[in-house]
Image: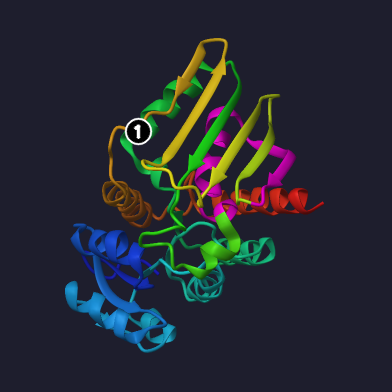
Amino acid sequence: MGRVDEQLRVGLVGAGPWATMVHAPGIADHPGTRLTTIWARREEAAAELARAHDAAVAITTDELLDQVDAVAFAVPPEVQAEIAIKAAERGRHLILEKPIAASLKDAERLADAVKANGVASLVVLTKRYTPETREQLEQLNQAGGWVGGSARWLTGALLGGPFSNSPWRHERGPLDDIGPHAFDLLDATLGRITDVIAANESEHGLWQIVFQHEGGATSVATMTMTLPLNPSIAEVIVYGEHGHRVLADRGTTAQQAFTNLLDDFVAMIDSGTTEHPLDVRRGLHLQRIIDLARRKAEA
């Protein structure tokens, strides 16, 4: 589906904390998008969020799809995949949360639906839409010669706060929730991840994963969501011929990053482009890494 008016009509699936803090205000405030409709499993939550942004409430996902050009998701991965496949089949463009599905099979189905129906897609890998990360990745890739690296993503998010009551996060843990962020940045700095050399989840929910990268580099990801750390730690370090570099966070907020994502998304649709470095294919690549790491840890 192409543009039907000056602003892209976007529907939002989900009305939880992330939808409330990031998706809804971002879409409503962006000059190129209009938040038209919200659907959530809890109709009262959808209604409250819709009132705050002058949007309509859909009783069913089909009703939402009837009213929009694109759909943004802020729901558990098993919910996202099924609705996103249906949306793609109806020609709706997609803003997807990570992981893009609850299983590799469903992620493959979703990627196939996006390709078959020629719709645009972007995955919300927040740090990749910040100007500092974009600048640093360009510099690192130009320099080259990086032989190893590490990612540390250590939080107490499941102990308290807005996401501590999220069933899917408790069930799937950091591998599915923060893993995509860490794996994506290691992959972007050191070369495509081609194998999981080793993976282990401790009884305390601490994941350690060793990766092999295309070109010979190796890296380690350490992740948890159940340690009482304040502040949280989220860092990526690479080292090689030019010493070591830290991907520094300069304070760009998740809301600002989402606005940058919407800039890219609107530009894709206006130009008829369906390919982007962070489209559904990126989500599928990260899903394969998640699947391989889990199978390696369970072996």
Whole-percent x and y of residue 97?
Answer: 46, 59
Left or right? Give the position of 160 relative to 260: right
Give the extent of the magenta segment.
Answer: 174-203
Q: Say if 44 sits above or below 141 in the image.
A: below
Q: Is residue 134 magenta?
A: no
- Which residue appears farthest toward the bottom when viewing the image? 59
User: Could you tell me which quadrant the N terminus lies in?
Assistant: bottom left
Residue 177 drawn in magenta? yes
Towards the viewer: 54 or 179: 179
Question: Taking 104 as reference, is 80 above or below it?
Answer: below
Q: Position of residue 262 (x, y in %)?
A: 31, 54
Secondary structure of the residue carrying numbered label 1: loop
Residue drawn at x 43%, y 85% as measured from the top left: 62
Q: Residue at x 54, y 34 (%)?
A: 151
Q: Nearer the viewer, residue 264 or 220?
A: 220
**Residue at screen point 71% across, 45% down:** 200
Residue position for label 1: 249
For this orientation, the residue located farthest to the right is 299
